[in-house]
Image (cartoon, rainbow, N blue to C red):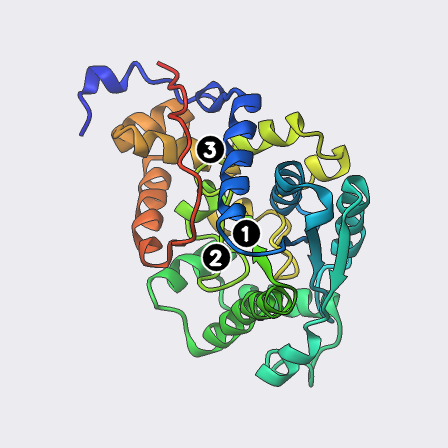
Amino acid sequence: MRDVNMSKQIHLTPEAFHIDAQEMCKQIETFIRDRFSLSYRDGIVVPISGGLDSSVVVTLCTRAIGKEKVIGLMLPERLGNPEAKYYGRLIANHLDIKTMKKNISSILRGLGTSNLFLSAISGRESWKDFVNWLLKKSSQSSKAMYIDSLKGQINPTYRKLLAQVNSKQRARLLATYKVADECNLMVAGSSHKTEQMVGLFVKYGIDDGADIMPLKNIYRSQLLQLAEYIGIPDEILHRSPNPDILPGITDKYQGYLGIDYLKVELILFGMQMEMSTDEIARQLGLDEQTVILIFEIVQLSENSRSKALGPVLAQMPINM
């Protein structure tokens, strides 16, 4: 553990994530360009949902190798977020890139993903109500269910629900690589450090599997600075971190962890700097058990962490 006096000199504030956005952009674009040149591929495909993460990745790829070689892939499905089409089109039109669409509903039907609840419910809003009813019936929050899932302790009903949710992300990956293989494209993924560290991704899903992960080693706060620098449209820049998987979860950090993303990543930063849990809790005004829980989640999700290739970036400045 880091010396106590040293720990007290580290300030857990948003300034800890300050970056030179221009320099980071240059490093990431060089990484994309270099990996692409070694790939023997004709272009890069980026699954786009209109969320901030994929919008930044597709923009960086466009800047790195040119819009003619980048394709934005839209992956709609029957119970998907209807906003994804609007925001996906928004970023594609903003960049003037080609798009492709692969509806994965038939894949999900084949997997049985669409069948478990369809006999009783119909449509995304009904599914949201059903999920909320399940949680209320068991007196469980989505946070408690998430922790139990990491520990392998959820009951069979929730296990089936989790398998359904996860299969959506894995079906998206399958569809993406089919397109990539057919068109001789490299796949760029959109996962970043904050969600990777706390396991807010699906192992072997679209947010885990890719040839390159340009954002893999940066926190979401740094991603926001990068997004501003490269001119992501405001409508996308200010969207909540919506996983577009489980209806009713509009902010995955609040929904699954019970605190906002900034406090989550400040805890992660304190952990990285080997600060004690009580010092992190004191600086952030949190109960120490909340900090300990985030530490535990990082450990529990280690075996699911993505191995996809990400750029090694120059060390970020540390706010002392």
Disc 2 to disc 1: CB gap under 8 Å: yes
Q: Quadrant of the C terminus?
A: top left
Looking at the image, which residue is at 80% across and 45% down? 90
Instruction: Identify the residue position indicated by label 3 in the image.
Output: 263
Q: In this orientation, which residue lies closer to the viewer: 60 or 151?
A: 60
Q: Amino acid at mark 1?
A: Gly
Instruction: Identify the residue position indicated by label 2 in the image.
Output: 208
Question: What is the CA distance from the residue labelled 2 to the residue labelled 3?
Answer: 23 Å
The answer to whether any part of residue 33 appears in the image is: yes
Q: Is residue 172 above or below residue 220?
A: below
Query: Residue 257, how many percent across, how many down?
Result: 47, 47
Q: Please tell me which of labels 3 and 1 falls first in the chain.
A: 1
Horizontal side of 85 relative to 309 (left or right) equals right
Q: Amino acid at mark 2?
A: Asp
Question: What is the CA distance from the residue labelled 3 to the residue labelled 1?
Answer: 25 Å
SS for tag 1?
loop
Query: Residue 17, how many percent across, how many down?
Result: 47, 24
Please state which of the two labelled residues, at mark 3 or mark 1, is closer to the viewer. 1
Query: Residue 172, how many percent across, how many down?
Result: 60, 66
Instruction: Identify the residue position indicated by label 1 in the image.
Output: 189
Q: Residues within 10 Å of mark 1 (few under 14, many from 20)?
A: many
SS for tag 3?
helix
